Image (cartoon, rainbow, N blue to C red):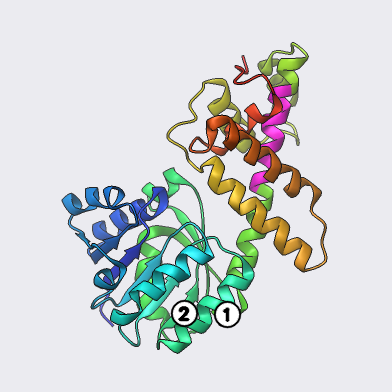
Amino acid sequence: MTDTLTVTVLGTGIMGAAMARNLLRAGHTVRAWNRTRAKADPLAAAGAHVAGAPAEAVESADVVLTMLYDGPATLETMRAAAPALPRGAVWAQCTTSGIEDVAEMAAFARDHGLRFYDAPVLGTRKPAEDGQLTVLAAGPAEGRDTVAPVFDAVGARTVWTGEDGAAASATRLKLVANSWVLAATAAAGETLALARALDVAPDDFFGLIAGGPLDMGYLHAKARLILEERLSPAQFAVKTAAKDAGLIVWAGERHGARLDVAAASARRLERAAAQGHGDEDMAAAYYASFDDGPASAT
């Protein structure tokens, strides 16, 4: 199997566009589609073929990579692409979706002769742009020689979780990882909100925990976005984080775990989106601590 592939990228938002560019840099032929074409058009200058419809995009694809909003949007797009899907092609499903959605996607793949890989990615805008994502992947050993060059182009590491994509073992791990990311982000925002309310300088708090077990780089990264009001462009947008938080809560409920922190994080993110911060970095959930509109953390 040649390492030079024709890869279709369906969904060229923050993550998908960055992944498509890294595929082009790796020498692959890239065909791209996005529901809002203006988000895909800039890829043409980098050498991608920008298609007007999903079916046009998947023609002659060795690998179809989906990076859309959620599971239902992915299935809708793949159904639109179905008439032109090459039998035997690999489908790398990189969207963060619900566990039940993955099973439905795998069934679609079987019905259309595709080799299915559950392959959500861990990372945000900057790692995506740098080709430093972590790919969490589950799928058959037969076909990995086809999909591996794609994962290598978009990520620094691939973590294999199983050989049955339908079991959603990669998505399960992604939801667990995102539950920690969302909890840490919410905690960072609430800590700064309380510091503001109590007239405590944020740097006094950072100095207090510096170098100890309570200190961590992620806290400083998200806090600085808030303190310096650098919430756009988003690394991981509020509205997308809210979607993921809902998936995490639902997965917990379906499998017997009550996730109070995740549920509260979902409500905070939804409140921040309603305040007008939906397209900003998820650190903007900080503003959900205040009912009187935007408040500086400094």
Please indicate whether residue 51 sits to the left or right of residue 297 in the image. left
Indicate the position of residue 181 as horizontal and vertical percent values. 64, 46
Q: Secondary structure at mark 2?
A: strand
Mark 2 touches mark 1? (CB < 8 Å): yes
The reply to whether residue 224 is in sight is yes
The residue that mark 1 highlights is 166
Q: Nearer the viewer, residue 47 or 132?
A: 47
Question: Label 1 sits on what residue type?
Answer: Ala
Relative to 251, residue 124 above or below: above
Indicate yes or no whether the magenta region holds residue 184.
yes
Q: Main secondary structure of the magenta part?
A: helix
Task: Say which quadrant the C terminus sits in.
Answer: top right
Q: Quadrant of residue 207?
A: top right
Q: Residue furthest top?
A: 199
What secondary structure is found at the residue carrying circle 1? helix
At x 65%, y 58%, the residue is 247
Image coordinates of residue 95 in percent, x first then y, are: 49, 62
The label shown at residue 116 is: 2
Taking the spot 61% from the left edge, 65% from the top edge, the residue there is 98
The residue range painted magenta reads 181-193
**Image quadrant in which the N terminus is located:** bottom left
User: Around disc 2, counting alpha carbons within 10 Å, would you say few (fewer than 14), some (14 to 19), or many (20 or more)?
Assistant: many
**Disc with the residue nearer the chain's start (2 vs 1):** 2
Q: Amino acid at mark 2?
A: Phe
